[in-house]
Image: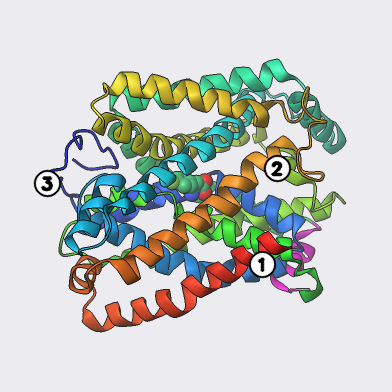
C-alpha cells in the first residue's frame, strides 16, 4: 500500500500497511493539502479581507492552530491505526475514557460531506475553464469580456450542473473502484509541474505594472482591515488549506511508518502548501492591480484573472489549458481524499464499497445544488443576512465545522489520550511532546474557543 487508500479497513483490526518512505508520506499529505484552497480560496479571501492583514492572521493561525492540530490529527491516526471512528473509540477506551469519542469521527464525516459538495461545484467550474482554454476561447477577448463571460457561465444552471455532475462522477468512480492510489501517483508525478507553472506566472506578474502594488497589498498590513470576519475567515482557512479538522489526515497517519518524525513532516507540508498560495496570490493580485480590477471581486477572482494573464503570454491557450489540467488533478485527488473516509465509514458498517460510493455521490450531488444554483435561479435566496447560498455552503464547513472538529481533535489528543502513547505516535521525543502538549492545551484550545465564541456572540 502506498497512497491514501483506506480499502480493507473494514473491521476493528489494525492496518498493517505502511508508506514506503518518508517522502511518500510527505508527498501524499501535500497532495491532500494543495488544492482549491491555495489557488482559488486564498486569493479570494485575501482580497475580501484587506490583503496583508488577512495574510498575517492566516500565518499566525497556521502556526498556533494549524500545525499543532495537524500533528494531533495525524498522531491519533498513527496511534489508532484504524479509520477515524474506530481509532477514536479504541484510543478512548484504552485510556479509560468514554467510547462516545467515536462520534467525533462521525462529525468529521459530516464535515467532509459538506466540503465535498461545494468543492465539486467549484472544480466543475475548472472543467468548464479547461475546455474554454484549450479551445482558445479567451485569446481574443478583452479583460472586460473575460470578466463578464464568467458571470454568464455561473448564471447558466445547466452548464454549472453538468460540470458538477461530471466532476463528482469522476471522483466517486475512482473511489468506488478503489483506484485512488494510482491517481495519486500520477498527481505526485505531475505536482512539480504545477509549481513550475506558478513560478512562470509569478515571473509574468513581475513584468506587469501591478506587481509592486500586489506585493504591498499582500505584505504591508493595514491593521484597520482586521474585522471580526477577517479573523474568523483566516482561522477557517488555516484549517481548510492544511486539510485539518475533518479526520481525513487520521487516515494518512494510520499508514505512517513507526520511525518517522511527525513534526518535521508536517512543517515540510505546510511550507509547500503556503508556497503555492503565496505564488498564486502574487500572480493574481498583480493582474488585479495592473488591470484596475477590484481585489474583492469574490469567488470568481481566479477564474477571471488567470485567463487574462495567460492571454497575454505567447502560447497562452496551451499554458492556461495546462494550468487547469494540473489544478483539476490537484482538486481531483483532494476530493478523493474527502470522499474516501466517508465511503470507508459506510464500509465499516458492512456496506459494499460501490454502494457506499453511489449513496455518498448522490447525497453530495444534492447537497451541491445550493452552491451550484446560488448564482442563477437561487441567487435571491438569502437565509442569513446577505449571505448567498454559496457563501453559506462554504462558510459553514470551512469556518465553523473545521475549527470545531479541530478543537475536539486537539482536546482529545492533549487531554484524553494516554500521554506515553501520544508521545510515541508523534515520534519526536518526550521533550517535544511536552512542549507540543503545552501549546495545544494552553494556546491552541483557548484561542479556538475564544474565536469561535466571539463569532457566535457577534
Ligand atoms: N486542503 C484542500 C484545499 O486546500 O483545497 C481542501 C481539503 C482537502 C480540506 C481534504 C479537507 C480535506 F480533508
> x, y percentage for residue 31?
40, 47
Say which residue label 2 marks: 391
The Cα–Cα distance between marks 3 and 1, rounded to whole angstroms, is: 43 Å
In terms of secondary structure, where does tag 2 sit?
Answer: helix
Segment colored magenta:
209-221
> Mark 3 near mark 1, Cβ–Cβ under 8 Å?
no
Q: Choose mark 3 or mark 1, whichever is in front.
A: 1
The residue closer to the viewer here, 322 or 423, is 423
Left of 83 or right of it: where is 170? right
The residue closer to the viewer here, 260 or 375, is 375
Return the disc, 1 or 2, that comes first in the chain's sequence. Answer: 2
Q: Choose mark 1 or mark 2, whichever is in front.
A: 1
* Mark 3 surroundings: few (<14), some (14-19) or many (≥20) residues within 10 A: few
Say which residue label 1 marks: 454
Left of 454 or right of it: where is 75? left
For residue 96, say whether it is visible.
yes
* Residue 214 shown in magenta: yes
Say which residue label 3 marks: 16
Left of 256 or right of it: where is 197? right
> Mark 2 near mark 3, Cβ–Cβ under 8 Å?
no
Amino acid at each position: 500500500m502506498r497512497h491514501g487508500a483506506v480499502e480493507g479497513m473494514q473491521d476493528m483490526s489494525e492496518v498493517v500497511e505502511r508508506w514506503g518512505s518518508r517522502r511518500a508520506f510527505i508527498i501524499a499529505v501535500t497532495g491532500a493539502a494543495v488544492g482549491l484552497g491555495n489557488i482559488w480560496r486564498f486569493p479570494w479571501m485575501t482580497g475580501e479581507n484587506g490583503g496583508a492583514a488577512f495574510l498575517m492572521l492566516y500565518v499566525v493561525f497556521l502556526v498556533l492552530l494549524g500545525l499543532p492540530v495537524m500533528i494531533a490529527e495525524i498522531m491519533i491516526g498513527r496511534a489508532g491505526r484504524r479509520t477515524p471512528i474506530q481509532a477514536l473509540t479504541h484510543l478512548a477506551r484504552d485510556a479509560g475514557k468514554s467510547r462516545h469519542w467515536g462520534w467525533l469521527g462521525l462529525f468529521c464525516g459530516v464535515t467532509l460531506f459538506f466540503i465535498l459538495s461545494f468543492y465539486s461545484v467549484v472544480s466543475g467550474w475548472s472543467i468548464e475553464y479547461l475546455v474554454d482554454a484549450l479551445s482558445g476561447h479567451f485569446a481574443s477577448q478583452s479583460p472586460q469580456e473575460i470578466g463578464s463571460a464568467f458571470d454568464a457561465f455561473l448564471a447558466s444552471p445547466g452548464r454549472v450542473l453538468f460540470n458538477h455532475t461530471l466532476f463528482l462522477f469522476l471522483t466517486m468512480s475512482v473511489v468506488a473502484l478503489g483506484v485512488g492510489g494510482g491517481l495519486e501517483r500520477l498527481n505526485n508525478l505531475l505536482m512539480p509541474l504545477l509549481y513550475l507553472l506558478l513560478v512562470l506566472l509569478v515571473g509574468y506578474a513581475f513584468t506587469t505594472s501591478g506587481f509592486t502594488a500586489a506585493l504591498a497589498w499582500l505584505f504591508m498590513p493595514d491593521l484597520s482591515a482586521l474585522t471580526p470576519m477577517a479573523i474568523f475567515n483566516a482561522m477557517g482557512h488555516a484549517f481548510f488549506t492544511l486539510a485539518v479538522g475533518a479526520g481525513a489526515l487520521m487516515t494518512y497517519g494510520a499508514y505512517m511508518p513507526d520511525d518517522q518524525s511527525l513534526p518535521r513532516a508536517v512543517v515540510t507540508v505546510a511550507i509547500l502548501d503556503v508556497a503555492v498560495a503565496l505564488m498564486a496570490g502574487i500572480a493574481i493580485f498583480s493582474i488585479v492591480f495592473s488591470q484596475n480590477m477590484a481585489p474583492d471581486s469574490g469567488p470568481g477572482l481566479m477564474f477571471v484573472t488567470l485567463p487574462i494573464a495567460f492571454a497575454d503570454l505567447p502560447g497562452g491557450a496551451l499554458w492556461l489549458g495546462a494550468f487547469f489540467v494540473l489544478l483539476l488533478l490537484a482538486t481531483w485527488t483532494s476530493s478523493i481524499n474527502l470522499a474516501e473516509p466517508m465511503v470507508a465509514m459506510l464500509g465499516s458498517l458492512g456496506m459494499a464499497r460501490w454502494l457506499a460510493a453511489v449513496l455518498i455521490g448522490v447525497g453530495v450531488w444534492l447537497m451541491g445544488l445550493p452552491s451550484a444554483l446560488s448564482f442563477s435561479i437561487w441567487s435571491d435566496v438569502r437565509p442569513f443576512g446577505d449571505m448567498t447560498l454559496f457563501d453559506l455552503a462554504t462558510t459553514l464547513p470551512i469556518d465553523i465545522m473545521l475549527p470545531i472538529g479541530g478543537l475536539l481533535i486537539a482536546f482529545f489528543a492533549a487531554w484524553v489520550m494516554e500521554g506515553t502513547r501520544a508521545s510515541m505516535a508523534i515520534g519526536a521525543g518526550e521533550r517535544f511532546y511536552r512542549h507540543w502538549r503545552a501549546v495545544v492545551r494552553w494556546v491552541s484550545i483557548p484561542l479556538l474557543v475564544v474565536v469561535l465564541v466571539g463569532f457566535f456572540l457577534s
